[in-house]
Amino acid sequence: MTKDECKKVVLDIIADIAPDEDLSNVKPEVRLRDQLQLDSMDFLDIVMELRKRHSIEVPEADYQQLASLDSCAEYLTPKFNALAAKG
């Protein structure tokens, strides 16, 4: 999975948990919570959906790695690729 594909996965999850948000102009380098009306429960929903849909575990200590789309891609892409390698 590429970093762009990973960003799309995160945006798809956000679209499902916050359907009223306009995701067309999300800046990848800016913190998601600074651009979108996401609260801590929404953030937990993102983490839960990553686990439910993609079997990606994000320990609480790593939550700050998911601050922006760019940081999500940096953190999650290797995890997706490791899962794909396991088959």
Image: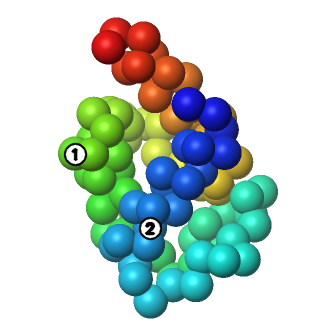
> Mark 1 packing: few (<14 Cα in 10 Å), some, or many (20+)?
few
Residue at position x 63%, y 34% in the image: 2
- Tell me the tag on residue 25: none
Counting from the top left corner in percent of width and height, residue 7 is at 59, 50
- Give the x, y percent position of residue 33: 58, 71
Residue 21 placement, left or right of 16: right
Residue 67 lies left or right of residue 84; in this view the side is right
The location of residue 8, given as percent across then percent down, is: 56, 54
First in sequence: mark 1 or mark 2? 2
Q: Is residue 64 visible?
A: no
40, above or below 55, in the image: below
Left or right relative to 60: residue 29: right
Q: Is residue 24 in view from this perspective?
A: yes
- For the N terminus, give its image quadrant: top right
Label 2 packing within 10 angstroms: few (<14), some (14-19), many (20+): many
Q: In which quarter of the image is residue 31?
A: bottom right
**Residue occupied by mark 1:** 52
Q: Which residue is drawn at 46% across and 28% down?
A: 80
Task: Identify the image quadrant of the C terminus.
Answer: top left
Please say which color scheme the image uses: rainbow
Instruction: Return the mark for residue 14.
Output: 2
Three-letter code for the amino acid on which mark 2 is drawn:
Ile
Q: What whole-number distance in Å separates the C-alpha atoms at marks 1 and 2? A: 14 Å
Residue type marked 1:
Lys
